[in-house]
Amino acid sequence: MIKVLGNNANKKFMKKFKGMKLGFVLFFIIVFNFAGLGQQEASLNYDTAAKVWTEALPVGNGRLGGMIYGGVAQEHIQFNEETLWAGEPHDYAHQGAKNYLGEIRQLLTDGNSKAAHKLAQDHFMSEPLKQLPYQPFGDLYLNFENHEEFTNYRRSLDLSSAISKVSYTAKGVNFTRDVFVSHPDQVMVVRLEADKKGSLSFEVNMDAEHEEKKLTSNDNQQSLEIAVKDGALHGAARLKVETDGSLTEKDGVLSIANASSATIYLTAATNYINFRDVSGNPAELVEDYLAEIEGESYEQIKTNHLEDYQELYNRFSVDFGDNGQSAKTTDQRIYDFWKNPDDPELLALYIQFARYLTISTSRPGTNPSNLQGIWNDKMVPPWLSGYTTNINLEMNYWPVEITNLSECHEPLFKFISELSESGSVVAKEHYDADGWVAHHNVDLWRGAAPVNASHHGIWVTGGAWLSTHIWEHYLFTMDEQFLKDRYPLMRDAAIFFTDFLYKDPNTGYLISSPSNSPEIGGLVAGPTMDHQIIRALFRNTIEAAKVLGEDEELVMKLNALIPEIAPNQIGQHGQLQEWLEDKDDPDVHHRHVSHLWAVYPGNEINLFDTPDLMKAAKQSLEFRGDNGTGWSLAWKVNFWARFRDGNHAYKILHGLLSPAEEPLRKNKGGSYPNLFDAHPPFQIDGNFGGTSGILEMLVQSHLEGIELLPALPDALPEGEVSGLCARGGFELSFKWKDGILENLEVLSKKGGTCRLAYGDNITIIETKKGETYQFNGSLKEMK
Ligand code: FUC
């Protein structure tokens, strides 16, 4: 960990980084050239309208989301509001479950797993057994008469402005539509223009799939009220139209005629206030949102949007060079990448798209990004479009710090805080323990109890894994106030495990039982992943307590427990054991690779401290193979980067960026035409995990310092990155050519020691807060 540096830290850092092989060391000094570095253009482009949802383009402001189809005769924007879910406030804990904990443990210890499963299924699962789904909200339709014939069709999503555009020519008139969702003004904006006066005519109406719905209009406004079928939530959407043409209303539909331009402002809200309170008034909220933009011009609202969005987006840029592929449509590029993975700009686009998705789904005050971000068109979406914590939810936040979007991590912290409340009830009812616990799935109601089935639902380290994000955020920002505010969540997650860990009569180790290694092997005693996560949580809590000068006694207790926890073990096939017993099957190619958690996102297993375990982990990954669902591929990219095998990481990325719907790829993970990650079906985690994987090839800062280009693949021989964040509070800009670092600029945001490594070159400098330091490719500081 970079945070806590002992007296001999510098020596240790040197030692750790000994043995790193570079091959070449640069001896010449390169003239710095960051002046030319700018924001690269990044856009998704198409020459036809979307036929299906995974071709439509996403827009969002963290709360409101839209999927734009871009049809000419009919525009369809399917929209969501992030708090519209089925269900109602409910804690899911199973009263009296704790009475069965001892017996379930004993059955597992005795090897009677069948009886353990049955007992757990009958008495230990959440009430009710299933959680509830995220819901679509509604649809906006714009119908244009006489637009059947058209030419010059283009459809795009510009990532630098977060504006989606459609343009075409019909009857000699050039038409354009711009759509964005404003965060400052909380409205979706659809701007339509025709370049010939008075030639824009269309009808507007909203609709929804909900059985309970009501559409009303008056003057230039239209309202849609809906209620979910199973539950306490209802919502209101409201739009208003401003135009220089005529506006009439008939049967709820608004008609615009003879206009040159028209702007639609749409907003939506529900009665959800928080996971315990549904007393909101959505009709009032949407009225207020629209009242707040009354009198503001379209130009002003667009300017507000751009200022707000670009303040986040423009902090980071990446350029891998462009070999001409970017002139093609995005769907074609994905197809061509599958055939020949030589489109470095597509990787840069993938990174910026993930940043766009982060900004569009996660803003301070919103809910975190669920399995589909905020976009969903199904009443029963895959896996309920929930918050799955045994990999997916965390993966959504893997690149958030590195890509300089630290405040977009906040929704996750708020979520953890709420989850700790429901999780403390579950800790008591299921485990008779203090602190809090969360299992593998969570819904809007912060359900923390084990759901669905004992063989995958009883997995106890969901809350612990999430809590590691608090420490990570601190490492990247060095923000002590943040740590002080959120530390109790880590501490209480750790306290749960001080009660929960159980001395295994067979081995004498402290183990996690009952639990599972997600989602393979059933209910077991002592899965490796749990122990890795619990140790990481304990270590983080110890470090955090030291920073804050708190909880000395707890620190002593955690320090004493860590060596008692079952260690990582190497098994008969040279593999890292997934379980306490040496029973891994090398022929199993399961999508989850949970026992490698300590390689990534953890750091307990690494090349310097534990080379043998690293070798075993690599062996395990080789057994699992190179295929997988979208998120599984994404995770493997990160592993291979940590194994310092950039070419293998790139091989996996090749799959992740290949067409999901290509029949010859037989339902593998990949990308849809709109660059959404395919599990399949659509699941947003792979977009984020793939992005963190690419960045792990460029910079790693999970050990004592910052390593430049630790796993650069041959396919990315040159590039330029700016605004990339590393642990310790540093922001990096650097450039490489022919696979060799040319120069580096480090901004120290908080001061302190900065340890840099590139190949055999190591530089340690004391930095001052706010200062920028420049280095040549051999890490020699340039004054
Ligand atoms: C976990 C995974 C599945 C899927 C689901 C949402 O259960 O095993 O593959 O991603 O989450």
Image: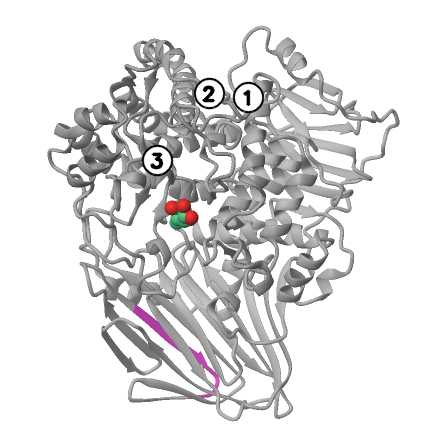
Q: Can residue 447 be seen in this view?
A: yes
Indicate the amino acid at tag 2.
Answer: Asn
Q: Dividing the image into 4 quarters, which one contains the C terminus?
A: top right
Residue in the image at 53% along x and 73% along y: 50
Residue 615 point in image, percent of width and height: 60, 24
Q: Nearer the viewer, residue 358 or 561?
A: 561
Is the CB–ligand 1 distance for label 2 below 8 Å? no
Say what secondary structure mark 1 lies in.
Answer: helix
Instruction: Give the CA distance from mark 3 to mark 2.
Output: 20 Å
Q: Mark 1 points at which residue?
A: 613
Q: Residue 122 has which mark? A: none
- First along the sequence among labels 2 and 1: 2
Instruction: Give the CA distance from mark 2 to mark 1.
Output: 8 Å
Q: Is residue 730 left or right of residue 364?
A: right
Q: Residue 568 has which mark? A: 2
Residue in the image at 18% along x and 24% along y: 102
Indicate the amino acid at tag 3.
Answer: Gly
Residue 185 point in image, percent of width and height: 42, 60
Bounds of the magenta span? 237-246
Comparing labels 1 and 3, the label whose residue is closer to the camera? 1
